[in-house]
Amino acid sequence: MDSNKNWREDLYVIIFQSDTPAGRRFDSILLLIILASLVIVILDSIDTVHQNYADLLAYIEWGFTVVFAIEYGLRLYCSPKPLRYAFSFYGLVDLLAIVPGILALYYSDAQYLLIIRIIRMLRIFRVLKLSPYLKQANYLMTALRGSKQKIVVFLLSVSTLVTVFGTLMYVIEGPEHGFTSIPKGIYWAIVTLTTVGFGDIVPKTPLGQVVSSLVMITGYSIIAVPTGIFTAELANAMRGEQLHTIARPARKTATNTAQPFARVAAMHCSRNWNKQSAF
């Protein structure tokens, strides 16, 4: 029983810890395997390569899938809390690295979903000790959380605009000019409002062209709104972190300064107590 427990602990250190030589070696090999599997998926999407080497690439890909399945099983086996790992971010990503290979048995194009394995390359931040980069990513997440409500309101407003403009264009232009339905008009409004302009549907009537010009001007007017919201929240997040960093040494200095005065006051009280006791 003890030997089994020790084996699981050693395996946990190798697989989950990157601050040991064995752990760093394991993570480095794993990243190389992930990178190789991504190269195989990309090569398999090229027609000439697929026609000549489809079977070979399929065997190699299945080999990678088996390796990742074994690795996932070992992670569940040696983890102190398997369910917590299974439903964590990295646990779900590790599972998604295996699922497309199984789905490819029933749907051949599902193998290209294996490109999701690139998310597993995020482990490179842990292996190479790039924690400052992860700290900067936390600023982005904080800014996104802070601007969530504003962005939702903005998206609802834009959705209302494109619905109104799409319906107007359907009424004004009609099916004879390509606006065969309201959803088709909404599609045109989204493409025009975002200043993409594919040109597959073009208004032909003068009134339709006026509305189109209004949509394009509106698009240029609102395109900077989400950027400004996110930038303001990002600045607030970074300013809050700077204030927290400055306040921490100040509190420490105040504590260190107060300690000698506290000792002097305690000595003074003790001396007065001794004098009173003598009387």
Image (cartoon, grey):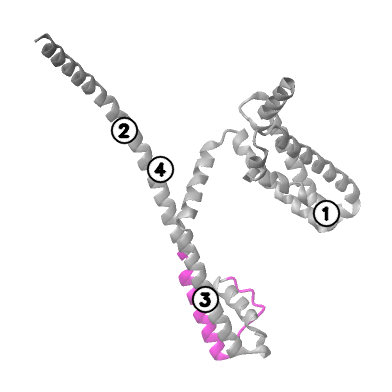
Q: Which residue is mark 3?
A: 160
Residue 231, given in percent of the width and then of the height, sits at: 44, 56
Q: How many marks?
A: 4
Q: Whole-Å distance between the Cαs marked 2 and 3?
A: 51 Å
Q: Secondary structure at mark 3?
A: helix
Q: Earlier in the sequence, mark 3 or mark 4?
A: 3
Disc 4 residue type? Glu
Disc 3 residue type? Thr
Q: Earlier in the sequence, mark 2 or mark 3?
A: 3
Residue 122, given in percent of the width and then of the height, sits at: 63, 42
Q: Which residue is mark 2?
A: 251
Per the rendered image, the range of residues in magenta is 196-225
Q: Whole-Å distance between the Cαs marked 3 and 1?
A: 40 Å
Q: Residue at x 78, y 49 (%)?
A: 41
Disc 2 residue type? Arg
Q: Secondary structure at mark 2?
A: helix
